[in-house]
Amino acid sequence: MIVGIGFIEFRLHDCHSLKGKRSVVKSIVARLRNQFNASVAEVGANDVHQQAEIGFSMVGNDRQVINSKIDKVFNMAESLGLAEIVDTDMEIISL
């Protein structure tokens, strides 16, 4: 079993309240969840207006497929244009 874990840190330039941030983050999370059938959640910076941290995970049986899907998640998050990506990180674990 192969487990892929990813992390994306966003900067939200136009958000001046937690309510505005929540709508952007919910949109990103929902689109990534629907497109890739992955577990996606906001995992940090919950009280900061202009920063968001999203984590996701995928499970499969082929390391190359998981690696490719994680790269596609990063690319889609960038192409949404809802927020600027500041940092990304990924880890692939074989169990």
Image (spheres, rainbow, N blue to C red):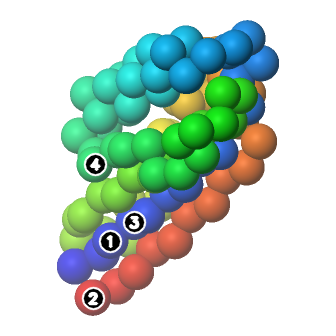
Q: Which of 48 and 26 lies nearest the eye of the viewer?
A: 48
List the residue tagged with mark 4.
39
State the residue position of label 1: 3
Label 3, secondary structure: give it.
strand
Q: Residue at x 67, y 15 (%)?
A: 15
Disc 3 + disc 1, Cβ < 8 Å:
yes
The numbered mark, 2 or 4, whose residue comes first in the sequence reads: 4
Element at badge 2? loop
Measure how far apart labels 1 and 4 are at the Cα level. 12 Å
Q: Residues within 10 Å of mark 1 (few under 14, many from 20)?
A: some
Type of the residue with mark 3: Gly
Q: Position of residue 91 (x, y in %)?
A: 52, 71
- The image quarter in which residue 89 lies: bottom right
Label 3 – label 1 distance at C-alpha = 4 Å
Residue located 35% across and 44% down the image: 40
Question: Toward which corner of the image does residue 48 lie, by quadrant?
Answer: top right
Q: Earlier in the sequence, mark 2 or mark 1?
A: 1
Give the number of the mark in front: 2 or 4. Answer: 4
* Amino acid, disc 2: Leu
Q: Where is residue 63 shown, x and y percent of the image?
A: 38, 71
Say which amino acid is labelled 4. Answer: Ser
